[in-house]
Amino acid sequence: MTLMLMAIAPALLIVIYIYIKDKYEKEPKKLLLTSFLLGAVFSVIVTTILYSVFKVFLPLPDDFSIVQLFIKAFFVVGLIEEFSKYLVVRYYAQPKADFNEPFDGIVYAVMVSMGFAMLENIAYVMQSGMSTAILRAFTAVPAHATFAILMGYFMGKAKFSPNKKILNLVGLTLAILFHGAYDFFLFIHFVPGISIGAFISLGIGVVLSRNAIKKHQLNSTFK
């Protein structure tokens, strides 16, 4: 039970944090919950299917080279996971009438991402124990949140822009790039110290995410 709570808590705390940051016009709790559950179920199913398809058409050997790890980080993990979340935000949340200001892009993207991250975290923590729970609470789960905020920032702008398609794709691309960079440095186990790159990437993502939140707050139409 303790492990389960440790696995769930980081995602829920981030959900609460973003809900509080939505200062001027709260989103309906039903839509938030549905987005969270779609992230935990639909996005995970899509990710699993796409992983299986990738393994069939472009299998990677067990002895990864730098190039193969780059492909795995950016074009397998980053692309597939962020695309699966993007689908929910783009086709479920963004068309809703309650998605009525740019900040809502951040809110819904984080809800979807935290649903995904919570389920992923449960799997890792229940398999590997308390040390993994503590480590991921300060790394992987917040990383998923930064990817979501960066994607949601542009998807929030997209809803109210004539360049909707471009801005949506900019958000998706940015999430993929940060996700890929974070994983790429963690995947290279055979180069001592290179994992610090993942934490630098995460730190940059956190700073950009804070700026994105502040900017959409300042420009809120309900302020």
Image (cartoon, rainbow, N blue to C red):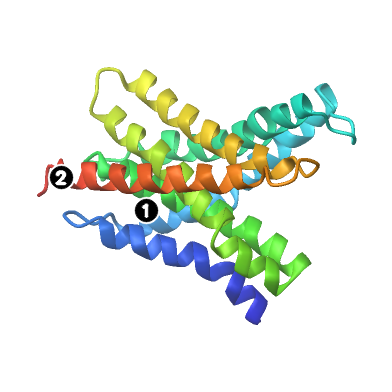
Q: How many marks?
A: 2
Nearest the viewer among 155 and 176 is 176
Above or below for 35 versus 124 = above
Nearest the viewer among 148 and 36 is 148
Marking on residue 223: none
Give the residue at the far bottom of this rendering.
1
- Residue at 46% in and 31% down: 174
Q: Is residue 113 visible?
A: no
- Residue at 52% in and 45% down: 200
Using residue 107 as the reference point, say whether residue 65 is left or right of it: right
Residue 75: x %, y % from top left: 66, 27
Using the numbered discs, state the Cα–Cα distance from disc 2 to disc 1 in whole angstroms: 24 Å
Quickly name the residue at label 1: 31
Using residue 160 as the reference point, say whether residue 114 is left or right of it: right
Above or below for 90 versus 113 = above
Q: For label 2, count other residues whose C-alpha is less than 10 Å away and answer few (under 14), some (14-19) or many (20+).
A: few
Q: For label 1, count other residues whose C-alpha is less than 10 Å away and answer few (under 14), some (14-19) or many (20+).
A: some
* Kind of residue at badge 1: Leu
* Kind of residue at badge 2: Leu
- Kind of element beneath mark 1: helix
Using residue 27 as the reference point, say whether residue 50 is left or right of it: right
Residue 109: x %, y % from top left: 42, 45
Residue 147: x %, y % from top left: 48, 42
- Residue at 82% in and 29% down: 65
Quickly name the residue at label 2: 218
- Residue at 52% in and 70% down: 9
Q: Quadrant of residue 28?
A: bottom left
- Kind of element beneath mark 2: helix
Q: Quadrant of residue 128?
A: bottom right
Q: Is residue 174 visible?
A: yes
Above or below for 62 versus 24 = above
Image quarter hosting the N terminus: bottom right
